[in-house]
Amino acid sequence: DAGITQSPRHKVTETGTPVTLRCHQTENHRYMYWYRQDPGHGLRLIHYSYGVKDTDKGEVSDGYSVSRSKTEDFLLTLESATSSQTSVYFCAISGTSGDTQYFGPGTRLTVL
Amino acid sequence: KQEVTQIPAALSVPEGENLVLNCSFTDSAIYNLQWFRQDPGKGLTSLLLIQSSQREQTSGRLNASLDKSSGRSTLYIAASQPGDSATYLCAVRSGGGADGLTFGKGTHLIIQP
């Protein structure tokens, strides 16, 4: 299995609070991605990174920001969480843009 | 905008049968296509990756084909086993940039012992 961890694995928070999710990899892969998975919508891309400090928006980026200060860490921040951001969040990595993407175990986030 | 559709949404078959899962995509200008399986409450496990220049890939009892011009891929599972029960997801990467995958909603597969 690819060395990807996500923290926390579960989180319950209240509307309006800031939340940061962390993805950590030990594979030294250049590309990192954040997806969310919701019933009826499948997995959708939130943001991605193609190198340290290089990030771009995905399909559902509103309300989210990301940062990548080191190759191994990719942070996803919800500045002010809303109930519509209740979801399962997955991080993925790949060595090159055309390579297989490997997924982390996911973080289940509930916003009350 | 790329859209990915998987048919059927759910499938239940007896153990030992060969089966085919279907995936279609609206924009044929893809870079590659990937098949995953997801067990309940778990992450995604990559099964097969097909580059746009390839027609098929095989791994054990799994065979995935790609017809880019018609916007279709199939995942063939031979001699199905109860352990194959999972949701199977198809995803495409469009264009040549670093942007991520567009996923279908999956086929929920149950193999009856």
Image (spheres, rainbow, N blue to C red):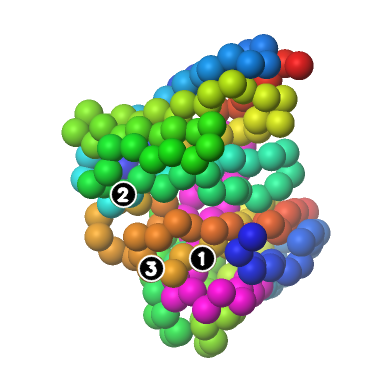
Which percent across, then down, holds residue A58?
41, 60
Magenta includes A40? yes
- Which stretch is magenta? A22-46
As drawn, the label of residue A96 is 3
Q: Secondary structure at mark 2?
A: strand
Residue for point 57% across, 80% down? A72
Marks 3/2 in contact by CB < 8 Å: the verdict is no
Where is mark 2, residue-wise? B51
Q: What secondary structure prevails in the magenta region?
A: strand
Position of residue A22 relative to residue A44, above or below, is below
Pick the quarter of the image with the C terminus of chain A.
bottom right
Q: Say what amino acid the circle numbered 1 marks.
A: Ile
Q: Are marks 3 and 2 on the same chain?
A: no
Left or right for A46, reference B28:
right
Identify the image quadrant of residue B38. Answer: top right
Whether the residues at callouts 2 and 1 have beta carbons within 8 Å, the answer is no
Q: Can see residue B106?
A: no
Distance Cα–Cα, label 2 vs label 1: 18 Å
Q: For this view, does A51 lie left or right of residue B107?
A: left
Q: Chain of mark 1?
A: A
Whether residue B9 appears in magenta in the rendering, the answer is no
Counting from the top left corner in percent of width and height, residue B75 is at: 45, 30
In the image, taking residue B41 as reference, residue A41 lies left or right, namely left
Tell me the kind of residue under disc 3: Thr
Q: Same subunit under labels 2 and 1? A: no
Considering only vertical position in the picture, is A5 above or below B50? below
Query: Mark 2 belongs to which amino acid?
Result: Gln
**Residue at the location (36% across, 64% down)?**
A97
Q: CA distance from mark 1 to mark 3?
A: 9 Å
- Kindly identify which residue carries mark 1: A93
Q: Toward which corner of the image does residue B96 lie, by quadrant?
A: bottom left
